[in-house]
Amino acid sequence: MSNAPTKAFASQADLEVKKVSFTRLSDNAYAYTAEGDPNTGVIIGDDAVMVIDTQATPVMAQDVIRHIRTVTDKPIRYVVLSHYHAVRVLGASGYAPQHIVASRDTYDLIVERGEQDKASEIGRFPRLFQAVESVPPGMTWPTMTFEGRMSIWLGQLEVQLIQLGRGHTKGDTVAWIPSQKILFSGDLVEFDATPYAGDAYFQDWPATLDNIAALQPVALVPGRGAALTTPEQVAAGLAGTRAFISDVWTSVKQGVDAGLDLNAVYKATYAALKPKYGHWVIFDHCMPFDVTRCYDEATAHRDPRIWTAERDVQMWQTLEG
């Protein structure tokens, strides 16, 4: 019988407060980042401010607003949701925006699984939901949706919201400033942080990253990790994310083809990836969810199954108990 300690569920043991950076990419673009915690993008136009991804609670949004107010007093009119995960959307009310914008696919995901996702995420990562009681009841609903692409003009500054393909979720949206070639990727790209792929499309994600690369961004704000401020850093962020997604898929598919069960596939994939990616933020948190979704996609579930708080714990006990 093993006396090895079991891992704390998901990130319940992660209590360390992270240092915030507010990085200027241009006169119009800033990145609010915190050592691998979820990032927020800020675009300052002629007459208004757009925020991309909100932080997890309205109280946490206040710190983003404090940073924005160090560089502009223009009103925050737009909040853009790069996708639907609770940690990205539940702070929206803190900005009192005129519009909350999302892809139609993201809206559909909120309808289908928003409540379950909210309960699941808060249980997984309590530190990221500081002052969770400040979140209004119910869901964060977009006031405006689009399919494929739309432009929002902040005075003369055009911001394009584009669905470049599925990856992290089916609703993934990037914000792109074409005049400056600056991209806000949401969780399609991570940097020195492990991609969470529990709701992903592993076979679509690499092509979506190719579509990002084709825009030739000179700077990119990833979903997690430091802002990428040169084309070389952007290329490194894209390559690292692509390699991780491909390595998980290759390992899981190999196990599935060999007739192994999820438990065996998980252990083999964890062992295979740990040396290369184990130092990335939230590696131990993400791997059980990532491998479970990848196993589903490689077997019987083209579309991601809904995570509930109960399913989370059951999965964790199966793989890490």
Image: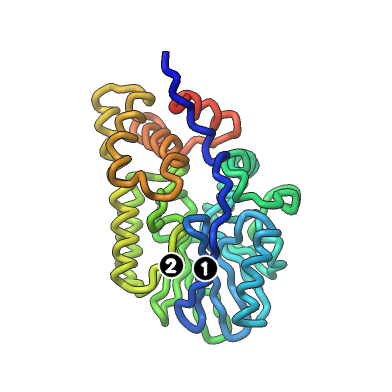
Q: Which SS class for mark 1?
A: strand
To which residue does mark 2 refer?
A: 227
Q: Position of residue 120 (x, y in %)?
A: 59, 39
Identify which residue is drawn at 66% across, 59% down.
60
Label 2: state its secondary structure.
Answer: loop
Which residue is the site of mark 1? 21
Q: Exactly how many numbered labels are in the figure?
A: 2
Position of residue 71 relative to residue 204, above or below, is below
- Can residue 146 be seen by looking at this rendering? no
Structure colour scheme: rainbow
Q: Depth-wise, is mark 1 or mark 2 nearer the camera?
A: 1
Q: Tell me which residue sits at (28%, 22%) in the image.
A: 259
Q: Earlier in the sequence, mark 1 or mark 2?
A: 1
Q: Position of residue 125 (x, y in %)?
A: 58, 44
Q: Measuring 58% from the left and 86% from the top, which residue is drawn there?
A: 46
Q: Marks 2 and 1: in contact by CB < 8 Å?
A: yes
Q: Is residue 66 left or right of residue 268?
A: right
Q: In screen coordinates, is 273 left or right of 79?
A: left
